[in-house]
Image (tube, rainbow, N blue to C red):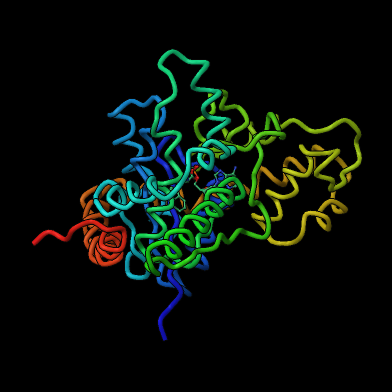
Amino acid sequence: MTRTRVFSGVKPTGHLTLGNYLGAIRGWAEVDQHRTDALFCVVDLHALTVDHDPARVRRLSRQAATLLLASGLDPELCTLFVQSHVDEHTRLAYLLECTATDGEMRRMIQYKEKAARERAGQSGVRLSLLTYPALMAADILAHGAEEVPVGDDQVQHVELTRVLARRFNDRYGRVFTVPRATRPTVAARVMDLRDPTTKMGKSHADTAGIVYLLDEPDTVRRKVMRAVTDSGSEVVYDRETRPGLANLLEVLAACTGGRPEDLAGEFASYGTLKKTVAEAVVEVLRPVQERHAELSADPGYVDGVLKDGAERARGRSRTVVDAAYRAMGLLPAA
Ligand code: AMP
Ligand code: TRP
């Protein structure tokens, strides 16, 4: 029996956060790689869609790969690689730009939000920010992925990928597997601790509400203790009226098991809840940080994993992308 094919990715636009870990990476390591045929990718081309510093992107790409291994991805069980090492992604992205409409791209929430931010800056909105979902769809479709494990914010992009795959198959013949998004049951959207109405995002300028995977224990404690909580004093779980508390309860549930609504009853004050959350996060990060320190001492190992991963990923995606070229009417090279 063939195993379910899974693909997911993370952008090297900043240091990885607790949101990345609880919303995506932990599930890849604990569940997906064991039960499926999974590929995980540091999507470095996506990091070029906004203002970027080349040296930083390079550094963050290696760091992201190292942290994925430190989080438990095992190269014996899954394929880990860097997007720009496998040309099939950009080859296919162009065909998908010829399948999608500009209206579809402009409707993407992430585009609207990021374009507004970039417009406020000096250098304008890169065209690639608009076409980003075509490249993301190519990542997924080139590998014939059936499942795409992501946090909430990426579900809209996976939905668009489904639309493009179906449209392509209807027009040109069945080339693509139609994928679906899968999400974690808790912590699919970890919110910023200082502003619980926005997602904890790794590239935000104000870092006080963001827990990074490599934050020292005392930094984690300080950030959690300073988390914005809501007015009132009773610990209840209500995402609408008490978003700050709800976020802390969800983080705790994700770290220790249990359900946020049940956990709420265990705390008499905000202070004790925060202390418990801080220690739970410190404990979840501890093994990841220890392993990261070991792996960082051996960059040759990480590079070797990425080289093998790219070879495997290349071989597998080539057939699909070649089939898409032929289906769309491109003359095969003699
Ligand atoms: P990105 O940081 O945008 O490259 O995201 C990598 C993965 O982490 C994607 O699956 C996202 O949906 C997920 N993710 C990012 N931020 C969060 C967050 N605050 N809460 C839950 N999942 C997240
Ligand atoms: N766009 C995703 C994000 O911002 C990253 C990503 C790129 C991705 N290609 C992907 C995620 C393919 C899943 C599958 O988080």
Q: Write the residue at 89% across / 45% down.
A: 268
Q: Position of residue 41 (x, y in %)?
A: 37, 53
Judged left or right of residue 123, residue 110 is: right
Q: Position of residue 233 (x, y in %)?
A: 90, 36
Judged left or right of residue 273, residue 184 is: left
Depth order, front residue of 284/78: 78
User: Compared with residue 145, is residue 113 higher up or lower down, i.e. above or below?
Assistant: above
Q: Write the residue at 38% across / 53% down.
A: 138
User: Compared with residue 108, is residue 300 higher up or lower down, i.e. above or below?
Assistant: below
Q: Position of residue 309 (x, y in %)?
A: 27, 60
Write down the quadrant of residue 63 in the picture.
top left
Q: Quadrant of the C terminus?
A: bottom left
Q: Position of residue 310 (x, y in %)?
A: 25, 57
User: Compared with residue 42, is residue 233 higher up or lower down, i.e. above or below?
Assistant: above
Residue extending farthest to the bottom is 1
Q: Quadrant of the N terminus?
A: bottom left
- Disc tally is 0
Q: Write the residue at 53% across / 34% down.
A: 111
Q: Write the residue at 80% across / 37% down.
A: 271
Residue extending farthest to the left is 334
Judged left or right of residue 314, residue 135 is: right
Judged left or right of residue 240, residue 147 is: left
